[in-house]
Image (tube, rainbow, N blue to C red):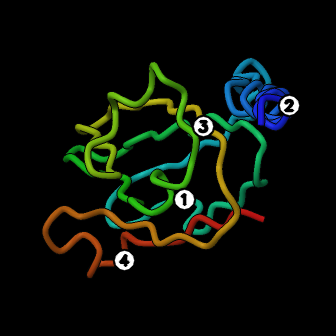
Amino acid sequence: MRRAIVLLAVGLVPAASAVAQEPDWSRAEPVTVILSSFYFAPSEIRLRAGRPVTLHLVNQGDGGHNFSAPEFFQAATIRPEDRGYLFRGTVELAGHRDKAITLVPRRGVYKLRCTHTMHGMLGMKGWVVVD
């Protein structure tokens, strides 16, 4: 029994160290996304799974917009100091403001939209595609 416990403990050490390893945030690739009057540019954001990226969200409009992709942010590993920019999977941006969020995306296709009244219906929506 004691031998089984020791073997189990030894087997868990590599797994624990792999889980605790932080991404190399300094290698994040910059990706700029423009938010403006009822559109995102690009409207389809393509990222590579498992590779750090810094999303530079730039609101070029006079009024507020947001970048809402709850499933995308839920699946991603977000740099600890950037987690405060998110509320329920949404980043709010006042007019002519920007924010940068560094994360490691997970493979999938995620809906993106601005949740401000009527903005999505007027075309402010898109996709985040992570291959």
Badge 4, how many Cα within 10 Å: few under 14, some, many 20+? some
Q: How many marks?
A: 4
Q: Amino acid at mark 4?
A: Gly
- Farthest bottom residue in view: 121
Asked whether disc 3 touches disc 1, contact meaning CB atoms under 8 Å apart, the reply is no
Rendered location of residue 21, percent (x, y): 73, 24
User: Which quarter of the rendering shows the N terminus?
Assistant: top right
Rendered location of residue 88, percent (x, y): 27, 51
Whether residue 78 sits left or right of residue 71 in the image: it is right
Foreground mark, 2 or 1, reads 2
Asked whether disc 2 touches disc 3, contact meaning CB atoms under 8 Å apart, the reply is no
Q: Amino acid at mark 1?
A: Ala
Foreground mark, 4 or 2, reads 2
Task: Identify the mark at residue 103; answer none if there is no mark.
Answer: 3
Relative to the observer, which residue lies in front, 52 or 116? 52
Relative to the observer, which residue lies in front, 41 or 62? 41
**Residue behind mark 2:** 3
Identify the mark nearer the N-term, 1 or 4. 1
Q: CA distance from mark 2 to mark 1?
A: 59 Å
**Residue behind mark 4:** 123
Q: CA distance from mark 1 to mark 4?
A: 11 Å
Residue 40, above or below 6: below
For mark 2, give the secondary structure: helix
Identify the mark nearer the N-term, 2 or 1. 2
